[in-house]
Amino acid sequence: MNILRFSDLLAQGRVRGQRVFIRADLNVPQDDSGKITEDTRIRASVPCIRMALDAGAAVMVTSHLGRPTEGAFKPEDSLAPVAQRLAELLGRPVPLKSDWVDGVDVKPGDVVLLENCRVNKGEKKNDEALARKMAALCDIFVHDAFGTAHRAEASTYGIAQFAKTACAGPLLAAEIDAITKALAKPKRPLVAIVAGSKVSTKLTILQSLARKVDGLIVGGGIANTFMLAAGLPIGKSLAEPDLIGDAKAVIEAMKARGAAVPIPLDVVCAKEFKADAAPTVKAAGDVAADDLILDIGPKTAALLAGQLKAAGTIVWNGPVGVFEFDAFAKGTEAIARAIAASPAFSIAGGGDTLAAIAKYGIEKDIGYISTGGGAFLEVLEGKTLPAFEILEKRAAL
């Protein structure tokens, strides 16, 4: 992918004294009191900000947080907790600026955080007038928010269109490199894990991957629908019977290419969905009418672990069981540890996947951890993301 990178501009000495506008993804979870409960995205955004500061730029950073109503700012929409955490990580003050669209006062060597960009009227619809105003604030626009790369909004697309210079920050560039390595030029066999509660939310991903991968592991409620498609009982487990035909089509598409969707041999069941429910391991054909399938069984976990250890490339999106409940987390743990032990290049993404990686402490053993949820899924669907498209266009000018 031919794009201009912020690192290129730094190497060419083109950043000193320039006004640099960084679109980051600082959309972090908070508790009811507004306290940040997990700061991965903030920490991931720090290198780009440091690069700009060290180069002597006047740095402006913005992000969305939550789902605010455009034009109606509320205290809970504020990036104030983010500014505080960013200041701690950078070891310097990070003033928070509101009503910033018409002008921002920042000196070279300093950084300011611009209040929640999704409060600006016209942000989501990529209003041209808003995008042009944002572009006028800077000399260099740096897109470093892969989590928003699938959205064509004023702060992600429009500003890139109209800024004097538009480039990819280190986080976005690393995502592009990892995606290229995993999907465009993968080392075979390529194994994908797609798990989640519903086939419907990931059907296009399953269909797209069925044309590319050598092994497609399904988990969670998605696996239950595939079990139905294979004629197996699932009791009262979560599934989508109306999508059995689609699941069968994915299985057949894989089979036609000499690949496979492994169907569970055994599962872990319970009579109710509770953390302290009694787990029972059953053969896949022995699930009772009142059973809930909450995890894959040990035989299935061992089979899948063997496939993962022999893979050349692994794409991981979603835990294979209710891993939040320890009694039903063994399948996800087995998968996680197999990926960690595999010599394959691995790329993992999605909120639950990141939580599983953190739970088992395998961050250092994953080739690349994507911080973009929806954007990561759209890449798996085979879509060209708007951020990639506009940055390629600008690089070609």
Image (spheres, helix red, strand yellow):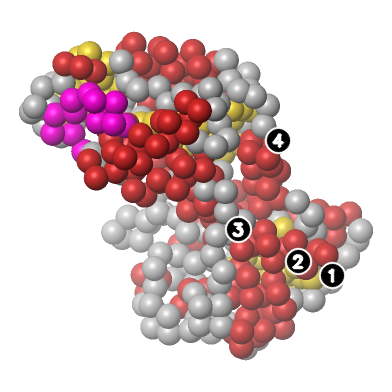
Mark-to-mark CA distance, 3 and 2: 12 Å
Residue 360: x %, y % from top left: 43, 26
Mark-to-mark CA distance, 2 and 4: 22 Å
- Along the viewing direction, whichever of 306 and 354 lies nearer the viewer: 306
Residue found 85% across the figure and 60% down from its top = 9
- Along the viewing direction, whichever of 197 and 95 lies nearer the viewer: 197
Does dot 1 land on a helix, a strand or a loop? Answer: loop
**In the image, is 93 to the left or to the right of 84?**
right
* Residue type for callout 2: Lys
Residue found 55% across the figure and 37% down from its top = 211
Does dot 3 land on a helix, a strand or a loop? Answer: loop
Q: Which mark, residue 393?
A: 2
User: Quadrant location of residue 315?
Assistant: top right
State the residue position of label 4: 185
Task: Provide the residue span drawn in magenta.
Answer: 226-238
User: Quadrant location of residue 225?
Assistant: top left
State the residue position of label 3: 385
Question: 10 Å neighbourhood of mark 1: few (<14), some, or many (≥20)?
Answer: few
Instruction: Say above or below: 355 vs 313.
Output: below
In the rendered picture of this protein, how many numbered marks are placed on residues? 4
Quarter of the image where the C terminus is located: bottom right
Tag 1 or tag 4, which sits nearer the N-term? 4
Pointers 1 and 2 in contact (C-beta within 8 Å): yes
Question: 10 Å neighbourhood of mark 3: few (<14), some, or many (≥20)?
Answer: some
